[in-house]
Image: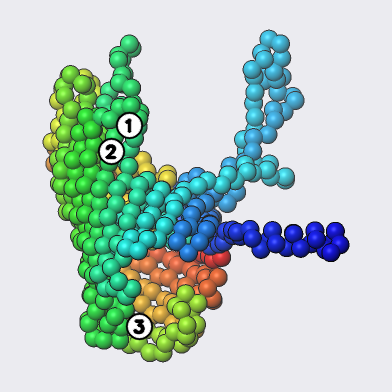
């Protein structure tokens, strides 16, 4: 055998005897844009109109090592998706040479005067920075699908937990920890999951007053167990919708339990239960989600829900009672259904058509103590007028019952009142909507609905005479709204739509002597899925 043949033989043998490793890489996500125009975003006479184009981007990347293990990383590129505008954030330009007083020199070495206004002829935007919003590992075992890392969580109709993976979502329920989804059988109607979340390893100062000079502050971090926040949770769900497909009755019943415990810093002990019901009875679909919260906590975040923060260590920790109940639901009755999907629904192929009437409702409790100052500013020694109870519940920012109501822009946030009103989250409100929906694979989807909302907790009578008027000063009605929308999905990769709404504000929206004025919205969107 020649040396060349021997070398080739040895090389081939080495290849055959070496184990081969491969990593499968997959990705999916979307890029979406939404143009919007509002005539009176704050319902205030004389307020300027608002025109914006929002953009949204999300990429899920999966690295699969084998049939059992994979790593998932979610990328986004906008810091604040409530303000991810096209044309935003210009790169600062240098100081003009003629601005002598601002030019750096020997006597004034630190002077700068950058121009932050965008160059109208040659724009330069700040570079987009990708950021990792979720990162976790999935590993499949015989009786458990293990998920470890920073992962999202969905439940029910999304009033409490929503992982923010849909286009135009601006909020996300994300937790660090581990989850075990228990596998009982190949085709199962009953499912269980258990898990642990590390909500906080490093806490911070919870006092409402500013630290005094020389005041000792405890060291927070991994060596201090008093600032930890931990959560244990489990879910139980029965779902026979697939098993009973085509039959007259199907049901989905699930409950989510969570126990949140904190150390000496926040003294948190909170129990959460979230019940979800979804019944299909012939042509009627009835969904409900009921959220229960029990316990006590010194977490300062509950001041935003009508509670009160600890003022000084000497006065002792303020423990807010956080007991509350919230709910949301929908009834949809199908007037007609015909045709069918061809293949998986996400490909939007076939000739399916449906018409339905729907009725939606939501109740989010409030806390009228939020109208009171947390502590009197002019009397440092006076006690709080709040009752150390945080009864309000703030829904997820992705739960949107209407185009205008509870869908405010950032410049509306100054209207927020602790436990009483939030322009972007459903809180302290009862909402009803009634509408008609037409869905067709070939023609697109059309929807029209009327929405009404009111505050549950009214402003105390003794505060209505205050010269500074706030939401709720003149009444509890938030007004009525009429929304229309049309959307069309061309295929799995692209969908678009238009929408419009007019909101007639109620007395609760009035914050001036003049009455609040109507707000008109026009909106168009397009989403590219990949």
When the figure is inspected, residue 522 is found, relative to residue 186, above or below; the finding is above
Query: How many marks do you count on the picture?
Result: 3
Choose mark 3 or mark 1, whichever is in front.
Answer: 1
Q: Secondary structure at mark 1?
A: loop
Q: x%, y% of residue 506?
A: 27, 55
Q: Are marks 1 and 2 in contact (CB under 8 Å)?
A: yes
In space, the residues marked 2 and 3 are separated at their CA atoms by 48 Å
Q: Residue furthest front?
A: 1
- Which residue is disc 1 drawn over? 203
- Which residue is disc 3 drawn over? 355
Q: Nearer the viewer, residue 144 or 157?
A: 144
Q: Nearer the viewer, residue 214 or 500?
A: 214
Q: Nearer the viewer, residue 407 or 492?
A: 492
Q: Secondary structure at mark 2?
A: strand
When the figure is inspected, residue 343 is found, relative to residue 493, above or below; the finding is below
Q: x%, y% of residue 33?
A: 54, 59
- The residue carrying pointer 2 sits among few (fewer than 14), some (14 to 19) or many (20 or more) residues within 10 Å by Cα, namely many
Query: Residue 229 — which label?
Result: 2
């Amino acid at each position: 055998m020649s040396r060349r043949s021997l070398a080739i033989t040895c090389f081939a043998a080495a290849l055959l005897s070496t184990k081969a490793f491969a990593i499968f890489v997959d990705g999916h996500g979307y890029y979406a844009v939404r143009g919007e125009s509002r005539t009176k975003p704050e319902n205030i006479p004389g307020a300027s109109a608002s025109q914006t184009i929002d953009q949204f981007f999300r990429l899920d990347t999966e690295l699969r090592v084998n049939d059992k293990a994979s790593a998932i990383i979610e990328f986004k590129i906008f810091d604040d998706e409530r303000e991810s505008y096209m044309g935003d954030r210009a790169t600062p330009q240098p100081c003009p040479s003629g601005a002598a007083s601002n030019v750096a020199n020997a006597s004034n070495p630190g002077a700068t005067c950058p121009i932050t206004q965008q160059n109208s002829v040659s724009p330069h935007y700040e570079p987009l920075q990708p950021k990792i919003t979720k990162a976790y590992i999935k590993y499949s075992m015989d009786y458990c699908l293990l998920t470890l890392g920073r992962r999202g969580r969905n439940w029910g109709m999304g009033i409490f937990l929503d992982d923010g993976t849909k286009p135009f979502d601006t909020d996300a329920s994300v937790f660090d920890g581990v989850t075990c989804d228990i596998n009982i059988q190949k085709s199962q109607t009953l499912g269980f999951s258990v898990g642990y979340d590390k909500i906080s390893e490093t806490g911070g100062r919870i006092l409402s007053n500013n630290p005094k000079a020389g005041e000792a502050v405890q060291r927070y971090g991994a060596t201090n167990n008093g600032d930890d926040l931990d959560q244990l949770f489990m879910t139980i769900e029965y779902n026979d919708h697939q098993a009973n497909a085509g039959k007259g009755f199907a049901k989905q019943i699930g409950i989510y339990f969570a126990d949140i415990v904190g150390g000496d810093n926040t003294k948190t002990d909170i129990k959460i239960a979230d019940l979800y019901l979804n019944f299909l009875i012939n042509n009627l679909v009835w969904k409900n989600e009921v959220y229960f919260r029990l316990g006590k906590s010194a977490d300062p975040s509950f001041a935003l829900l009508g509670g009160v923060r600890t003022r000084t260590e000497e006065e002792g920790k303020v423990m807010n009672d956080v007991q509350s109940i919230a709910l949301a639901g929908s009834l949809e009755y199908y007037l007609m259904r015909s045709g069918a999907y061809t293949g998986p629904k996400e490909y939007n192929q076939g000739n399916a058509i449906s018409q339905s009437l729907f009725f939606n409702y939501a109740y989010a409790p409030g806390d009228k103590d939020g109208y009171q100052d947390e502590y009197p500013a002019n009397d440092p020694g006076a006690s709080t007028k709040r009752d150390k109870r945080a009864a309000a519940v703030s829904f997820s920012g992705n739960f949107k019952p209407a185009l205008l109501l509870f869908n405010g822009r950032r410049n509306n946030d100054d209207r927020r009142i602790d436990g009483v009103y939030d322009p972007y989250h459903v809180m302290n409100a009862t909402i009803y909507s009634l509408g008609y929906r037409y869905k067709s694979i070939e023609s697109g989807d059309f929807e029209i609905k009327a929405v009404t909302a009111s505050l549950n907790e009214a402003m105390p009578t003794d505060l209505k005479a205050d010269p500074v008027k706030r939401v709720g000063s003149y009444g509890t009605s938030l007004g009525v709204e009429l929304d229309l929308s049309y959307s069309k999905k061309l295929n799995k990769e692209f969908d678009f739509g238009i929408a419009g709404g007019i909101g007639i504000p109620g007395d609760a929206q009035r914050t001036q002597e003049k009455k609040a004025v109507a707000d008109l919205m026009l909106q168009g969107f397009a989403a590219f899925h990949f």
